[in-house]
Amino acid sequence: MIETERLVLKPLTYDQLVKYLKCDNSLEEELNLNETSRTISPELKEAFEQTILPNVADKTKDYLYSTLWTAISKEENKMIGDLCIVGEPNDNGEIEIGYGTYDEFQGKGFMTEIVGGIIEWTKKQENVKSIIASTDKTNTASFKVLEKNNFIKIGEMEGLFNWKLEIKNKTIV
């Protein structure tokens, strides 16, 4: 678990991911949270089925690098958004992140705080040397989150900007 000023970031277990996918507030009940109005996009549902659930179920992998980290507002005791790390660090020590804020919580700086929390966590992970992310070129809010967290734009592809953050100040545990 990761704690920031306004949030708690909680990595979900396999069973919790299954409840998350149902969108029936069973996960919120299990975590003793207030109900959240959230929906799952077809893209996220496909990611769950194709990647997230199989990787979290694979006991040979560290599930923290595959699961959804849900962000819980301390003040409202509600889930407000999510971040996912797309697999364990590659040979270059890179991890990729994807993220989203639920509609009613957008524009309040939560995602900047969530990404900042994950950055602090990665500083303690000895195999992580950098974080990469891609944003839609039209999603200004998404790339402002990365800019505020000191990511550098390293390139672009059709419709996407590519970003990278080198992790410094490694903590020896």
Image: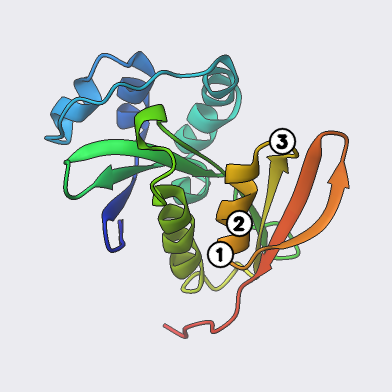
Residue 86 place in picture, x, y as percent: 60, 43
Q: Is residue 67 above or below residue 123?
A: above
Amino acid of disc 1? Asn
Q: Earlier in the sequence, mark 2 or mark 3?
A: 3
Residue 86 visible:
no
Q: Is residue 48 left or right of residue 113?
A: right
How crowded pointer 2 is (Cα within 10 Å; few <14, some 14-19, many 20+) is rated as many
Q: Is residue 148 above or below residue 36?
A: below
Quarter holding the C terminus?
bottom left
Residue 69 place in picture, x, y as percent: 40, 44
Most extreme residue toward the left, as rendered?
Answer: 32
* Residue beneath disc 3: 138
Q: Which residue does the image show at 60% across and 53% down from the upper left?
A: 144
Q: Alpha-carbon distance for marks 2 and 3?
A: 14 Å
Q: Which residue does the image show at 22% across and 37% down from the upper left?
A: 78
- Cβ–Cβ below 8 Å for labels 2 and 1? yes
Q: Alpha-carbon distance for marks 2 and 1?
A: 5 Å
Q: Is residue 28 left or right of residue 128?
A: left
Q: Is residue 49 above or below residue 158?
A: above
Q: Earlier in the sequence, mark 3 or mark 1?
A: 3
Residue 4 location, quadrant: bottom left
* Residue beneath disc 1: 149
Q: Is residue 134 above or below residue 129?
A: above
Quarter holding the N terminus?
bottom left
Q: Nearer the viewer, residue 141 or 37?
A: 141
Q: Nearer the viewer, residue 60 or 127?
A: 127
* Residue beneath disc 2: 146
